[in-house]
Amino acid sequence: MWRNIVSTFLTVLIVLLAALGGLVAWSQKQYEGPGPLTQGVCVKVSPGQSFAAVSEDLKAKGAISSAYIFRAGADYAGKAGSLKFGSYLIEPASSMAEIVEQLTSGGPSSCGTELNYVIGVTGEQMILREMDATTGQYVERAKFDPKTAKAPDGFDDTVKSADVRLRVTLAEGATSWQVVEALKLAPFLSGTVKDIPAEGSLSPDSYDLKRGTDRGALIAEMQKRQRAALDAAWTNRAEGLPYDTPEAAMVMASLVEKETGVAEERPVVASVFLNRLAQGMKLQTDPAVIYGVTQGKGTLGRGLRQSELQRRTPYNTYAVEGLPPGPICNPGKAAIEAALHPADTKFLYFVADGSGGHVFAATLAEHNQNVANWRRIEKQLKTQDNTGTGMADDAGGDAP
């Protein structure tokens, strides 16, 4: 009899253990396998919110199949107490394990609202965008220049929200003075910048920030990234370049940056300047002359006068030989790479082609013909503009 009881007990125990093992395996599959979402959703984690509340929100939004398994898996992984507040885009079919990792790793909010403060060469833009979770794309809600326009109604209240992602984006070609002046207008930053950073020392890049970030700390990060970019490019530079120091290469990069916004032209423009230096020719680049006039404090807003072209300043490359004494802007990585990996050409001249790019020439005769062609195009553009065609003059400035 006892033998039958023991046998029955062991049989039941084995069945229970098998069932428990099956339940564990099923739960693990639920936790690690693809989730039920068919389109993305935004999930907001508020400061101090409990893991249980977040799991119930995820279940209500259809991101997970079981709040209990979600919590149990997070507990087992030791991450249930590591929630980071913010707004998160949960991608379709995300597993519970992936969602736990996303909500506990932190970093910039990937959903909800984003404020991107863009600092450009000719102005600044506050751009407020909101993520459309169904498409994974941001939708612009507001855009204005804080220097010349008032923030739209509701803007200030929106950007004060703790989970708004804050970014500063520095465009290629802005001067250090422009950057410092623009940062003064960012209401989400703190502190002051005592001195204008050295020209060329700031990296055009996108910077994710926390509310209250010190302006001086942001400048230091910009300088750190620019130094790293220059050092890396200098280490891998082409042979036979005339630069004695990385700083001289940065001067060339700034000239290239201001002369063209066309990516494929940058190495060619660098080759023109290097070819002219090799032949003892003056660089004759207008952006350098303009910098000598403005000292980097904004744009000139007009063409250069003959008196300015004839005035002998360290930056007047029509009057002095060699490179200017320092950079004329903060160039991006592509311009730095172009200065240190120029194209192999015979070109000595270039001029605008009327389409936003340039046409290059190896001889003065070719260049003069190109200039004549450009003058005809320029005249046509002005005539069309005066007759109301609205065709834009996007040719850029003169060049060597």
Image: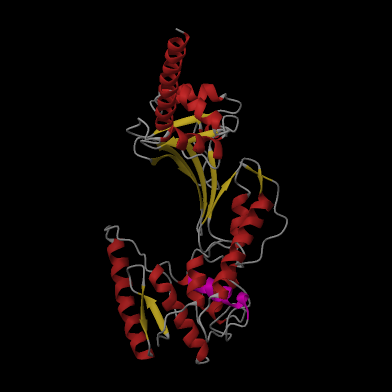
Question: Is residue 248 in the magenta section?
Answer: yes
Question: Magenta residues, as a range?
Answer: 245-257
Residue shown at the point (55%, 42%) measured from the top left: 107
Q: Going by the image, does 126 lie left or right of 93?
A: right
Residue shown at the point (26%, 58%) measured from the top left: 389
Residue shown at the point (51%, 26%) measured from the top left: 72
Question: Is residue 71 in the magenta section?
Answer: no
* Residue 384 image-quadrant placement: bottom left
x, y (%) of residue 120? 51, 56
Q: Residue 287 versus residue 86: which sits nearer the camera? A: 86
x, y (%) of residue 91? 39, 37
User: The C terminus lies in which quarter of the figure?
Assistant: bottom left
Q: Is residue 198 above or below residue 244?
A: above
In the current view of this chain or complex, which residue is farthest to the bottom?
279
Q: Residue 372 versus residue 125: which sits nearer the camera? A: 125
Q: Is residue 186 above or below residue 390?
A: above
Q: Going by the image, does 114 lie left or right of 315?
A: left
